[in-house]
Image: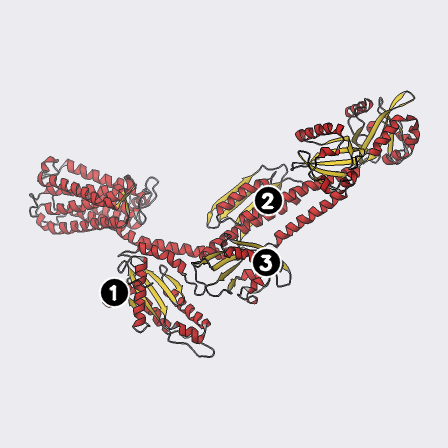
Amino acid sequence: MSSRSLSTVLKRPFLGTRTQLPNAGTAMLLVMLAIMVVLIVVPRPQLFSSVGHYLVPHSLLEMGAILVALMSAVSIFQGHRRTLPTSFLVMGCAFMLSAFFDMVHIFSYDGMPDFVSEASVSKAIHFWLAGRTAFIIALLAPCLLTARPVPRRYLPLAFGLTLAIGLAVSWIGLFHLDFLPETFIVGSGLTAWKIGYEWTLALSAVLAAVLLLGARRLPEGTNAGWLAVAALATGISELCFTLYATAFDVFNLLGHLYKVVAYAMIYHAIYSSRMVYPYQQLQKMSDALGEAEQRWQFALEGSGAGVWDWDWKQDTDHVFYSPQWKATLGFQEHEIGSSFDEWKSRIHPDDMPRTLDDLKQHFEGHSAEYRNEHRMLTRNGEWKWILDQGRVVERAEDGRPLRMIGTHSDIDWIKEQQQRLISSRARLRSIYHSAPVGIIVADRDGTIADANSAMHALLGKSDAELFQQSLWGLFSLDEISRMKRAWGQLQREGGSFQDEYHMQTDTGQMFWAEVTLTPLEGEERTLVLINNIEDRRRAIELLEENATLYQEVFSTGNAIKLLIDPELAEIIDANPVAADFYGYSIGEMCGMPLGRINVLASQSLSKRIRAVVNRTDNHFEASHQLANGELRDVEIFTGPVDLNGRTLLFSIVHDITDRKRAQRDLQAANLKLSRLSESRSQIHHLAECLLTCSQLDEIITQLNVRLPSLFAGCEGNVTLHDPNDINQTMHINWGTPPTDARHLKQTLTVGDGQVGEFVLLIPPEEDSLERLQPLAEDVSHLVMLALADLQLKRGLAHEARKDTLTRLFNRRHLDEVLPQKLAEASIGNPLSLVVLDLDHFKQVNDTYGHEMGDQVLTRLANLIRESLRSSDEACRYGGEEFVILIPGASAAVSRARVEAILEAFHEEVFEHETLGPLTGLSFSAGVANAPHDSQATDALFNMADNALYEAKRAGRKRVLCFNSLPPAADSHARQPAH
């Protein structure tokens, strides 16, 4: 196998492992193997003439390995503050055992002075194998043992057990070596047992390398790749110890050299890597924070919502309005100032009391957040509906609000939809009350919920007299039971029902009425149409009682009249009105089969004729076809008459096409109104729920619950990408696709980025498209608005930790991060706390004004920000006082950095129009260091503050460290300063 192919094999992941060998480590292993192979092939060089010449290099190599093993053990024990994984506890103890056995191995080596017992090759090999065994156990421990945490209080017990094992093995090696098999025979060299044990150690090292490359439980910062390289290097080292013939052989020296190389790799994998790891992680966190801030900025600009920030700490009348806030009302950035009156003066007078009351309720803590809809005056003089919502983010100790942040959204389009709904209701109400027939809306129990004007006129009762009254009270006593049976059948079976009933007016007058019952789709109510047919009934009764008047009645009047032979199903006679209506002459109609004008099938037509002859049915509706092919809806009142001993059917036909069309239009309009009202109600409720969501999962839940009912009968799919994780995509699916479905698609965007899409498959009917397309657009807009609002809330939470003037962090942020920073501080990673206060700042404000004072604070903040590292943090603590946290720096280093800032600030020049330039400004600062000075928050702050006090007292314009204060000042500094 060539060296290139061998390198490829070494770099290839073992058995699907998670980690690969580093390139540098692979190269080192190849070199080590090459040197060993060369020494096997060529004649073995004799580097040392005797064991005495070999003792010094042997001892130095072993001492180096001992030092690295102890450093690795210390790194493991010191890298875990409270608890330690079981596997790493064993690993650290094994490293300590390895160092202990190597130390005894040095003193036991042949040629060394006697140590307790006589030095010999076998004795040295015994401790050598014990040390190598402990080392292999250290490499296998993190792969084979559990990572269950062990409290640090058990460390003394572990150390005691480790010492006991070391003493036991040493006791055998020093006093009872004869208990063990022979490892070396003078004159013959290594025994088979010793060579076999070395091969076992070599194979165990290779196994450890494979397991380390696939290990998942190593602590953060541990370099698994270099640990695997160290294990392989140990295996090569063990192979060398199977080849030497004397204690000072070249392979003995090479094995020790390879052992030191393996220990150096251990040092790099555990000690060096864990030192660099925190700084790498800190850089990643800083990069992620920058990306998050940029995404928040894009979301804020693309959401269309304005932002306002009311900060009472600066000025109770000062309010920050974002450019988008001003643009919503049509103003440019410079056209609106930053006073509270800029908002208040533009509120509609009718909305003002309610708006201010909602704001007051939130100030006093009676509501979790401020939320109000009101009209505001735009730049072009029009009124626009605005949704204003916000929350107090900071309060004083007595509960007074100190800062409030909120958003300002244009909801004109929602109000327009509401107004359209109101107008549509009004139009339908007008049709309802202008209908020529009486209409009642009743619930399932027959209780009257509404009645139109024609119904009031027919019964002579007012709206109050009918509302919530029983429908049965309108019928005569002998008709109530029949009406109730029909009502019950309709509620159980559905459909529609029509019959004639005897009803009474408010004065007790009885009249015949045609009652039509139609359930309202989607509601627990029934539409009752009542038509006064008293005149029609009287006419039919008159025809039945006096057939001799047939010709006069038949030929006169405006009604369509037919005389029909029930046996032949033919028209015997027709009046002139019938001829005009059907488009035939009277001669053509006489003898015409009834099926030519009645579109009923012949069997159904015969059945209906028999019912009329048997007097079981005398009224029905049908569709009649005219001569031109047009179909007309007709209402037929018919009954048998005897003419010259022959039974014929006398029929009066009314054209009810317009009435039926009006009924269908009324039902369709009512259904459309019901659906529109329900959809808009759901849209409004969905909008309220989405805009209160604070997590993306809440938005997904709301859409999962509400979209299937809002788009019933459709198949839909919503795809959303998490704005914080573009690789995470969530889907919402519902429904089954309708036949010949139409495809609607809405792209969901926030800012310039696409966050998903909304796909809807709807039925092919035109009314479905007309109804569902606006709903789909509204839902898409609501989802985009909710996502933008969610990103805005996240951004506002971050912005609340910034000082509005200097853009440094504020005291609230400092109170949160300082305890965390102090908990992480250590001797190897100290934390410096700097308290900085401007000198004579009050004189600057009094002489040059507060605007100049703000410039001075802003300039100093910029100088501090420019001098900070990414790991440092600066905060405006209050007024002219600043606090700087500098991790990883001693007090002296931090003092030098702050003095550089002081020098740069002292050279700054601030121009003033009337008083001339302001120069020579300075500040005083105090530095305290954790854990050197203290690791308690209040104590460390007091020390830095008192160092600042000493700097002020010593003449200002200087930086003092707490640890450099004289004893008197030190004593004073230990007293509470706040």
Residue 575 appears in which quarter of the rendering?
A: top right
Mark 3 neighbour class, 10 Å CA radius: few under 14, some 14 to 19, many 20 or more = few
Mark 1 neighbour class, 10 Å CA radius: few under 14, some 14 to 19, many 20 or more = few
Q: Residue 482 in the image: x percent, y percent?
A: 73, 27
Q: Which mark is residue 353?
A: 3
Residue 286 appears in which quarter of the rendering?
A: bottom left
Q: Residue 185 in the image: x percent, y percent?
A: 9, 38
Q: Residue 392 in the image: x percent, y percent?
A: 48, 56
CA–CA distance between discs 3 and 2?
29 Å
Q: Residue 98 in the image: x percent, y percent?
A: 19, 45
Q: Which mark is residue 573?
A: none
Relative height, residue 823 to residue 160 (above, below): below
Q: Along the horizontal axis of the image, is 832 left or right of 621? A: left
Residue type for callout 3: Pro
Q: Which mark is residue 682?
A: 2
Pick the front one: 234 or 310: 310
Residue type for callout 2: Gln
Relative height, residue 745 to residue 950 (above, below): above
